[in-house]
Image: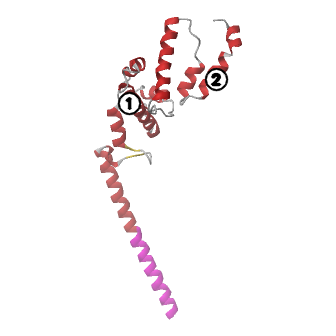
Amino acid sequence: MDQALFDILEFNKILALVAERTLSPIARNWFLATTPSTDIEQIKHSLSQVSELRAIIDYDESFPLEAFNDITGSIRKASVIGNFLNLQEFIELKKISVLSRKICLFLKERKDKTPLLNEIASEMQSLREVENEIDRVIDEPSLEVKDNASKTLSRLRNELRTNQDRIRRKLEAIQKSWAEKTTMYSFLNRIK
């Protein structure tokens, strides 16, 4: 298509309006990079997908969709040997996995009404095992690795707590001893 026609139709303004309503940065970028298609079959297919989703939104239960962050950088990072994700990145990965699973289940329960959306959902893989492992290892509210994440970590943290208690008791004993000595010294000075 011709750029002049895009300008007349204000295509970029329409994309910007749609992009403002997206729930994730990746969807926003996808919309902003969209170009019109001239393939009639592809256009019909896309419109049918939109019609299925619109029918769900208009006449069905609430579609399980919520805002999420773009994790493509984290996925790229994790694909390089020697790189590690931080705890927040693991939580974001889990959040998207749970959301994807909910959407797939929602669409599967309505596969007769949404065959085209089910085609998309059938390509998505469940990461339930990854979700469970993240839950087992990371305390989400505090963003800390749980003691039971590994036997070694559990042993090391127990040793650390034991040593901290030992040091605390030793410091308390020293403080008590000094307090007694100071009291005794004050008493002896008053007697003189």
Quarter of the figure with residue 126: top left
- Above/below status of 62 relative to 185: above
Local crowd size for mark 1, using a 10 Å CA cut-off: few (<14), some (14–19), many (≥20): some
Is residue 79 highlighted in magenta?
A: no
- Above/below status of 79 relative to 84: above
- Please state the horizontal and vertical placement of residue 106, each as a whole percent of the image: 39, 29
Mark found first going from the N terminus, 2 or 1: 2
- Above/below status of 186 relative to 89: below
The residue at the point 35 percent across, 57 percent down is: 161
The magenta-colored residue range is 171-192
Residue matched to label 2 = 16
The residue at the point 46 percent across, 20 percent down is: 52
Residue matched to label 1 = 101
Q: Which coloring applies here?
A: secondary structure
What kind of residue is marked 2? Answer: Ala
Answer left or right for 14 relative to 178: right
